[in-house]
Every structure is written in structure tokens, then in C-alpha cells.
Image (cartoon, rainbow, N blue to C red):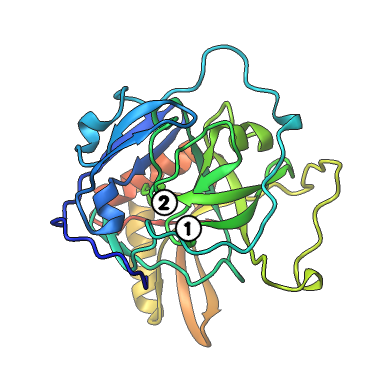
Amino acid sequence: MKTLWRLSWPLAITLMLVGCGGHRSARPSYASTHGGSGSSRYSSGSGGVYDDTSRPQSSRYRSNSDSIPDGPPPDVSNLPEPVPKVEARSLYGNKSPYTVLGRTYTVLSSARGYDERGIASFYGSKFHGYKTSSLEDYDMYKFTAASKVLPLPSYARVTNLQNGKSVIVRINDRGPFHEDRVIDLSYAAAVKIGIWPKGTGVVEVQGIDPSAPPQQEAPPPPLATVTPAHPPSIYLQVGAFSDPANAERIAAQLRVANFAPVQVSDATIGGRLVHRVRVGPLSDVDSADQVSSKIEQLGLPQPQVAVD
């Protein structure tokens, strides 16, 4: 990112995997997405906590594991959704490319045209009041989210493909770095579209470009929530090969290991014919996580989640 700021701190990448209920995610350290080890910063906003961003993830937060507030979920029906507007790119959190857990990510220049289906998770009390990657205070009672690739800040509509509920969120954080996840929602956003209390759900994330003329934006969904006639199916894509023999070899290896059903299907990607090896459909997110782990134990690359 182009900025007048120059960070002179040494590069330090420290990460910790966290889990809450049925979801898994990884929050990046300040250093992992900014190129420096950070400095002590007091977060006096929603959580009123002292947030020393130079400390390692293992000792930065007040709790070792994520959780949700005690008592019933909040009534989010009266919470206003963020109104997309053109905002200056954050000075923090837009380093590109950046590397977390051995994987490198490139931040998109804008949210325009971004449309991805996958698994959503959410994060809650552990991070409430602490700094996000953009150095804003995380407020779990606002409609915000974390993305690996959307610029900070930006906006997106997140739709739960299993019940049709949707919410507009403001992207102000990086994550989730569990590779099976496409977005990490705030607690309020998760409640709004029914990702809470299970912890995960199958969603579509559509970037919103506030600078586009109104007629270029997709019309908002109807006020009434409509349950999809055909719920989305979850697949694990183990690879996409130009050589059909390679695809069949991997498919045979999976079948011998009793993964079923295993499919080899053709697709045209970027004008090139590829042969995709997929396991599924799988019944739910938990099954996808378990099968993905077993596939990795065979020495194969971590599968990619595909939602059709």
C-alpha cells in the first residue's frame, strides 16, 4: 500500500489458533499484516481494554479461548446495518502480499466484483475491545467482519445460503486463516443471519462498491426471508488438473481410502479445460472439516471448499 508512514520495527509473525463452539479461526498478530512488531496501544472503545499489540498472541488477550456473552443473544433486529460509503484505505492492515501460517495472500484493490461462496465462522468475547488489523476496536455488537483479501475498510453483503438471511458488514479485520473459511463475522452479524449458535454456516460473500452508480449494484434481497428450495452442497476439491490421467490417479487414491463419493468433473477456468477432483457432497461443515483433515493425512494438499 502507498503510505507516508514507514514502519521501522523488525518483522515478527506470531499467531495463535483459537476456537469457539463449532468454528475455528486464526487471528493475525499486528506484525503479520503490517510488517512490524507493533507498539503498545490502549483501546478505550467498546471493551475498554489495554491492548499491547507488541505482545505475542499467547499473552495479548485477557482470555485464552474465544467465547460468546453470557445470557440470551442480543436483539439485533434494531441494530442499523452499515451504510456503504467511499472511505480512504486504512493505513494499517492492507500490506500486500502478506504471509500467515506459511500461506501468502494478496489484498484486492477494491471489493468490486468480489463474489465467493464458502464457510463462514464468527468471533466474539475474546477479541471484544481489542484492535483489529486496521487498528480499529473490535466491537462484537456491530456488523463487521474479517476477510483475508478484501481491502480495509470495505463492505460486503453476506448471505446465509441455508436460510436466505443476509446482512451488510463492514470489513475491518484480517482472517480467518483456517483455510476452509471464507469470512469471520462479528457476533452480531452471526446472530443476524443464523450462523450463531452453531458457529459456522455456508454463505455467499458479495463485495459492495460504494463508488459505483446505484443502477450497477445488485438490488437488495426481499425483506421476507426465503428458505432456498435446494440448500447448497459442500464439496472438497482436492485438485484441478490439466492432465486427466493425474485427476484419475488422485481420485483412485481417494476411493481406495474409502472417501465417497469421489467425482472427477470438467470445468473451463480462464479459458483452460481442467479436470476437478472433488469429494462430496458432504452433509455439513463439521463433516467437511473431518474429511479435510483425513485427506491431508494421506499426504495430499489441503482441499479447497467448494459450494454448489
Looking at numbered disc 1 in the image, what kind of residue is underneath it?
Leu
Instruction: Note whether 265 is above or below 306 in the view shown.
Output: below
Image coordinates of residue 75 in percent, x first then y, are 70, 24
User: Which residue occupies the extreme left position in the image?
Assistant: 10
- Dot 2: element: loop
Q: In this image, 252 relative to 83: left or right?
A: left
Left or right position of 265 against 245: right
| Quadrant placement of the N terminus | bottom left
Mark 1 to mark 2 CA distance (whole Å) = 7 Å
Asked whether the viewer can see residue 55, the reply is: yes
What residue do we see at 56% from left, 44% from top?
144
Q: Three-letter amino acid code at disc 2?
A: Ser
Q: Between residue 251 and residue 186, name the one nearer to us.
A: 186
Q: Nearer the viewer, residue 70 or 18?
A: 70
Q: Position of residue 51 (x, y in %)?
A: 31, 33
Residue shown at 67% from the left, 38% from the top: 193
Q: Which mark is residue 134?
A: 2
Q: Name the residue beneath numbered marker 1.
A: 152
